[in-house]
């Protein structure tokens, strides 16, 4: 988790070899999204202050032996609504 402006950003980092069949973002399945959201929800319930706006990002890392890894930051990669969830406070 991190902050970007006023938002709390929950980031899932996925690394794959550049020849992998699927992009790293595709490893963040519907079920994985639900688990990430549930973890963020537990964290937010622990805050004593009013929770900030939250967004969910994915950082993809593609590597090739002997090369500098390539990174791609997917902001707003998924939402609560897309995962079929709501915050429970």
Image (tube, helix red, strand yellow):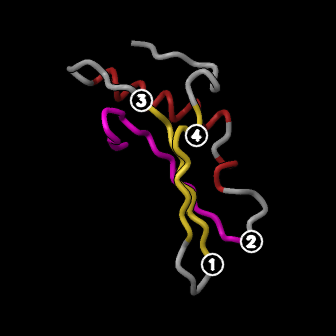
Question: Decide: marks 3, 4 in contact (CB < 8 A)?
Answer: no
Which residue lies under the disc numbered 2?
19
Q: Secondary structure under badge 1?
A: loop
> Going 51% across and 47% down the picture, which residue do you hit?
12
Which residue lies under the disc numbered 4?
77
Task: Please tell me whether mark 1 or mark 3 is closer to you in this view.
Answer: 3
Question: Decide: marks 2, 1 in contact (CB < 8 A)?
Answer: yes
> Going 25% across and 24% down the picture, which residue do you hit?
47
| Label of residue 64 in the image | 1
Which of the marked residues, 1 or 3, is nearer the chain's N terminus?
Answer: 3
Whether 9 is drawn above or below 18: the answer is: above
Task: Please tell me whether mark 2 or mark 3 is closer to you in this view.
Answer: 3
Question: Decide: marks 4, 1 in contact (CB < 8 A)?
Answer: no
Residue 60 in magenta? no
| Label of residue 54 in the image | 3
Q: Nearer the viewer, residue 42 or 15?
A: 15
Q: Secondary structure under badge 3?
A: strand
Structural distance between the alpha carbons of marks 2 and 1: 8 Å
The crowding category of the residue bearing disc 2, from other C-alpha atoms within 10 Å (few below 14, some 14 to 19, many at least 20), is: few
Bounds of the magenta segment: 1-18
Q: Secondary structure under badge 2?
A: loop
Which of the marked residues, 4 or 1, is nearer the chain's N terminus?
Answer: 1
Task: Please tell me whether mark 4 or mark 1 is closer to you in this view.
Answer: 4
């Amino acid at each position: 988790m991190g902050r970007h402006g006023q938002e709390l950003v929950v980031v899932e980092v996925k690394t794959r070899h550049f020849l992998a069949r699927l992009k790293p973002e595709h490893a963040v399945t519907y079920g994985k999204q639900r688990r990430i959201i549930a973890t963020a929800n537990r964290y937010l319930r622990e805050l004593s202050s009013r929770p900030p706006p939250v967004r969910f990002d994915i950082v993809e890392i593609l590597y090739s032996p002997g090369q500098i890894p390539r990174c791609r930051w997917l902001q707003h990669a998924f939402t609560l609504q897309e995962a079929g969830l709501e915050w429970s406070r």
